[in-house]
Amino acid sequence: MKKILLVMGLASCALTSEKIIYDCADTKLELRPREDGADVLLKTGRNSYEFFRGLERVPSASGAKYTNDTAEFHGKGDEAIFTHDDTTMKCYLKDD
């Protein structure tokens, strides 16, 4: 029984470690999907970060949409829109 629980725990850890990286002009955006939503990390400078936790997945006509009281991420294909406070950024999936 303990081995089964360990495997399930590792599977959920793998889900949270996934990062999808976007370029948004001079800002790097990391979308970190979770089972029940997503977190977003913005890197706006060499040592400048903003972290938006607990965005919930919400229905969308197309693509993936996550939102909370302060931020919204809507991605479709290689493009995404991220809005926080009164700022909206158009983002593109980063090429490897």
Image: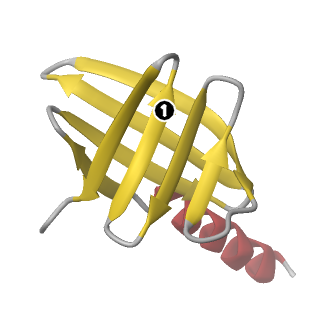
- Please tell me in which quadrant of the rendered image residue 79 appears: bottom left
* Horizontal and vertical percent position of residue 21: 30, 55
* Horizontal and vertical percent position of residue 64: 58, 63
At 47% across and 27% down in the image, what residue appears?
Answer: 51
Q: Residue furthest front?
A: 61
Camera-nearest residue between 53 and 4: 53
Which quarter of the image is occupied by the N terminus? bottom right
- Please tell me in which quadrant of the rendered image residue 78 appears: bottom left
Horizontal arrangement in the rendering, residue 92 relative to residue 19 (left or right): left
At 41% across and 36% down in the image, what residue appears?
Answer: 41
At 49% across and 52% down in the image, what residue appears?
Answer: 32
Camera-nearest residue between 10 and 61: 61
Give the amino acid at mark 1: Thr
Horizontal arrangement in the rendering, residue 56 relative to residue 43 (left or right): right
Q: Residue furthest right?
A: 1
* Horizontal and vertical percent position of residue 7: 68, 78
Camera-nearest residue between 24 and 13: 24
At 16% across and 37% down in the image, what residue appears?
Answer: 25
- Please tell me in which quadrant of the rendered image residue 96 appears: bottom left
Q: Is residue 52 above or below residue 20?
A: above
- Report the colour scheme: secondary structure
Q: Secondary structure at mark 1?
A: strand
Camera-nearest residue between 56 and 9: 56
Q: Is residue 55 above or below residue 44?
A: below
* Horizontal and vertical percent position of residue 19: 39, 57
Horizontal arrangement in the rendering, residue 4 relative to residue 43 (left or right): right
Q: Is residue 53 above or below residue 80?
A: above
Q: How many marks?
A: 1
Q: Which residue is mark 1?
A: 83
The crowding category of the residue bearing disc 1, from other C-alpha atoms within 10 Å (few below 14, some 14 to 19, many at least 20), is some
Horizontal arrangement in the rendering, residue 4 relative to residue 37 (left or right): right
